[in-house]
Amino acid sequence: MSENFGKSVRIHLVEGNPQGILTAEIINWTGHVITAPRSKLASLLARDEIGKAGVYFLLGIDPENDGQNLVYIGQSENISRRLAQHNKDEKKSFWEKTCVVTSKDHNLTSGHIKYLESRLISVAKASGLVSLTNDTAPDPSNLPEADRADMEYFVAQLRLILPLLDFAFLREAATIKQNPSKPSASAAAPSLSPIFELTSKMHSLTAHAQEIDGEFTVQEGSLCRSSWEGTATHTYRSLWETLAHQGKIGPDDTGRWLFKENVAFSSPSAAAAIIYGRAANGRSAWRVQGTTESYDQWQNQTLPQVPDAAE
């Protein structure tokens, strides 16, 4: 029987601060990850591991599409030389952060890194969390079965460690579980809440959401306001505009505004604000579907009971 075990991740602040160069490793994994802002490129290129074979990510914001993350995914047998070339490329003007992935055991071959590049491009596309700037999407290289298995494990570890370093675009797209009362057969299934519902009789809106592994995910097809009606300077206004620019919310054929895909939020209030078009207390607005129980009440019931302190 398979079990879910925790993993130990070692993150090292090379320069003593989180804004500089970072390295990261998962215990008992051969991969080695290093990240740096583009302003630290000279220091990054001076490191020995950057001269090895591996894959890399160049991440930034689309200057013509507010809030849209852009990424270029590449591979090279000498990453240092390739990054220096990219630094002269005007098409890479969006590039702000660098992530380089190599192997501690020096066993990544040309075939391995080409396979990784192809798979990582496919995973990033499927996530819907970022726009790729790659001109092509190469097919995976033809590796022996054992090597393919090793590289799939490599990809799985990257999907675990990169979100810790603020490179979250390899996550799986959030999936709403339609019948949470049925137990999952998989021991590695995500942590799921009941389905929550939010309504507005005034605007004829109904939305559904579920908390999945700590993220409050609004379901595709949920209705929302067609404009931001709240305070112009509110933080959630820029979030609403970003989702609209990205096409994650927008009109259907009848002109109603809705979520075009599942969208994960940091909190129930953030989700409620996008749906209402103004700031809202999502902890009280969202209700467990089919009941009057609020998200706040539901969450409090899931907390461990702590006995009152003796007076």
Image (tube, rainbow, N blue to C red):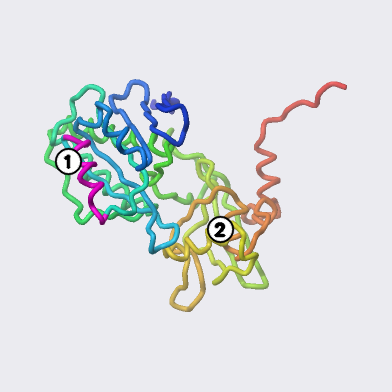
Residue named by callout 2 = 208
Reply above or below: 81 against 216: above
- Amino acid of disc 1: Lys
- In the image, 279 versus 50, the foreground residue is 50
Mark 2: give few (<14), some (14-19) or many (20+) Cα within 10 Å. Answer: many
Q: Would residue 39 appear left or right of 198 to someone viewing this image?
A: left
Q: Residue furthest right?
A: 311
Query: x, y percentage for residue 68?
Result: 41, 57
Label 2 residue SS: strand
- In the image, 212 versus 165, the foreground residue is 165
- Amino acid of disc 2: His
Label 1 residue SS: helix
Query: What residue is shown at x 26% (from left), y 23% (from top)?
Result: 104
Q: Is residue 56 magenta?
A: no
Q: Which residues are magenta?
A: 78-91
Give the Cα distance between marks 1 and 2.
41 Å
Front: mark 1 or 2: 1
Query: What residue is shown at x 28% (from left), y 49% (from top)?
Result: 72
Query: What residue is shown at x 51% (from left), y 50% (from top)?
Result: 179
Main secondary structure along the magenta-highlighted residues: helix
- In the image, 308 versus 31, the foreground residue is 31
Query: x, y percentage for residue 82?
Result: 20, 41
Tag of residue 114:
1
Reply above or below: 275 against 114: below
* Quarter of the image that includes the N terminus: top left
Q: Are the two marked residues, 1 and 2, in contact with CB atoms closer than 8 angstroms? A: no
Query: x, y percentage for residue 188?
Result: 42, 34
Q: Is residue 82 magenta?
A: yes
